[in-house]
Image (spheres, rainbow, N blue to C red):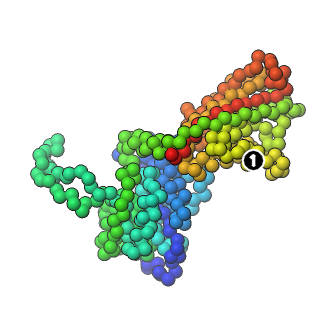
Amino acid sequence: MSCVNASSLNASSCIALIVAAGTGQRFGAERPKQYLDLAGQPVLRRTVEAFRRHPKVSAVRVVINPAFRDLYDAAVAGLNLPEPVAGGASRQDSVRNGLEALTDSAPGLVLIHDAARPLIDAGTIDRVIAALATHPAALAAVPLADTLKRGNGGPDGGLVAETVDRSGLWRAQTPQGFRFPEILAAHRDAAGLELTDDAAVAERAGLPVALVPAREENFKVTTPDDLTRAARALDSALSDIRTGSGFDVHRFAEGDHVTLCGVRVPHTHRLDGHSDADVGLHALTDAILGALCAGDIGSHFPPSDPQWRGADSALFLKHAAELVTARGGRIAHVDVTIICERPKVGPHREAMTARVAEILGMPVDRVSVKATTTERLGFTGRGEGIAAQAMATVRLPG
């Protein structure tokens, strides 16, 4: 297969190729590590989002093992990514398959990144891209700080045979960036070999590879301890902890059900409102918006706008959650209290909790839904309507 004609390249475009075709056997989990939860989101989603947010990255393409297509679809739901590429028998084969899939796009640059490095920062991506202005290849790396010892190969580590000079030695990370035609040609020529990374493929082809300083936090998740370390790193970065509150009320009207926290509950009446009048989701939406200091639900979805007539209130809650994500934060915990005499919330509470967790993309054990009455006092006590109050804890970068 011939190499891409350089004259056909879109020199200004840069595509991130995320390699996620591994099975994660060393990790020992029930699913590949790139699909495990990391602070409320799959590892792969966090990796993909880091590149999607970067202003110099034109698109993101993921290489996967087709056997885990369902896990992939769930991990990247709503991100509108191009069709994933089927990986090969080895990482090198998977990367080559990914590069071949990019030939129609013919980007000027390609960044190849491990799916299991979810803590990649924008600064490192910037530096790798910048290095490609003067070099055909560049890799993120960290200089060695520890003293190196070579063992004699004996049992249990054996004895020290010698001290190895660490000067000039670096630990390679990803992303590893390349000018697209050169790395595609290099990978085609190296097919069948077992080189350890894409920089090695470039070196074999005689391409100079620039070393770009990276961060220790850009480590690869390989063991359960690594996953715990990554979660702690994410938490420490989200040091701006905020709490927001929300309150909503809707009167009863003629009908046969109410919608509470996204669940249809049979009742003698419905709730009157411009949307589906879900007091639980409305109160929770306002709580999240309040934590962000981003106005209230009416400022984002005016009741005077006909497009929201009868709308599913899940749309409002998803919008609030997306605003948190756009600011690099996450929702740590939510708590909703439904206030009414009827209908009884208890039989539906588990379903409500699950639905809120699904909408927000967070674990069920971080969602609380409960109910109370006003001992027949006030408008809820008289059965004139339902009220809800909510609290949300949001973590944002400090």
237 and 254: which is toward the camera: 237
Taking 134 as reference, is 53 above or below it?
above
What is the x, y in percent for residue 114?
42, 56
* Residue denoted by label 1: 299
What is the x, y in percent for residue 14?
50, 68
What is the x, y in percent for residue 214?
37, 58
Q: Counting other residues with Cα less than 10 Å from the Cα at mark 1, is it few (<14), some (14-19), or many (20 or more)?
A: few
Q: Residue at x 75, y 47 (%)?
A: 299
Residue 31 visible to the viewer? no
61 and 38: which is toward the camera: 38
Q: Residue at x 21, y 60 (%)?
A: 167
Q: Quadrant of residue 113?
A: bottom left
Taking 207 as reference, is 66 above or below it?
above
Q: Residue at x 80, y 24 (%)?
A: 380
| Relative side of 207 to 359, left or right | left
The local secondary structure at tag 1 comes to helix
66 and 320: which is toward the camera: 320
What is the x, y in percent for residue 197?
34, 62
Q: Residue at x 73, y 38 (%)?
A: 282
**Total labels drawn:** 1
Q: Say which quadrant the N terminus sits in.
A: bottom left
Amino acid type of the residue tagged 1 in the rendering: Ser
Residue furthest to the right:
254
Residue 246 visible to the viewer? yes
Q: Quadrant of residue 196?
A: bottom left
Residue furthest to the top:
375
| Relative side of 161 to 64, left or right | left
Taking 137 as reference, is 350 above or below it?
above
